[in-house]
Image (spheres, rainbow, N blue to C red):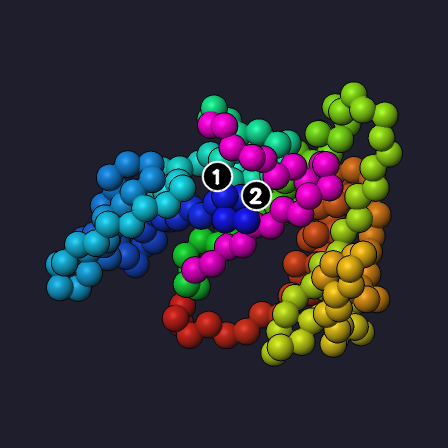
Amino acid sequence: IMSNITVCARFRPLNSKEKQNDNNSVCIRSRDTETFIFKDEKDEESVFSFDRVFYEQSEQADVYQFLALPMVRGFRFVCIPIKQIDVVDGYNGTIITYGQTGAGKTYSMEGPGILECGEQKKGLLPRVVEGLFDSLNSSDEKKTYSIKLSMVEIYMEKVRDLFDLSKVNIQIKESKSRGIFLPGVTEITMMDPVEALQNLSKGIANRTVGETRILL
């Protein structure tokens, strides 16, 4: 449902190499929190609008509160009457990061390190994990919850299990009762945020890493 899709743009600060170009690398000019102006190599300007634009000075907490917290707890920090997606109530919630290498996707999702960063710099993954457990622990409803973690990557058109590297070609299936699922994928039951983040760290370490020439 399109009303349940939120699209945001985030711009990272200039790196040291870009700063040496006297800010000539900057092609973005802010208009407001939902709109930015892009200037191309011909100095022609185009205006782009999103649900939210996060500029260089944005904090990790800002991104989490706007983008992920509504999915975890079912409310927005801004008072807008919209239909909520609450994963605690059993709905699916998905966050996708997309962008060029070096754009800041990993920083936004993980922070400097998923296990080794302070409150200010930690990314969406640790914040979502902590928020999910906080929501369940603070719930007054007499329900029993089970949190299970699976982690896969799609590489060379094959689905790999990052918790069991012997499973290198998992098939994607679909049924009326389960929807889309991955038969045989490893599922680890999580008891607390620390255990969840430790397992996420192991899965991240098993991802395939290839050469990226744009950074060479």
Mark 1, Cα crowd under 10 Å, few <14 / some 14-19 / many 20+, is: many
Residue drawn at the location 63% of the way across and 70% of the way down: 154
Which residue is most to the left? 43
Mark closest to the chain's N terminus, 2 or 1: 1
The image shows residue 72, relative to residue 155, as above or below, that is above
Q: Secondary structure of the magenta portion, mostly?
A: loop
Marks 2,1: beta carbons within 8 A = yes
Q: Secondary structure at mark 1?
A: helix
Residue drawn at the location 41% of the way across and 63% of the way down: 100
* Residue type indicated by callout 2: Leu
Left/right of residue 99 with respect to residue 112 in the rendered view: left
Who is closer to the viewer here, 87 or 108?
87
Residue behind mark 2 = 124
**In x, y percent, where is residue 208?**
62, 70
**In x, y percent, where is residue 153?**
65, 66
Residue behind mark 1 = 63
**In x, y percent, where is residue 132?**
69, 36
* 114 drawn magenta: no
The image shows residue 75, relative to residue 197, as above or below, that is above
Which residues, given as a range, are shown in magenta? Answer: 80-99
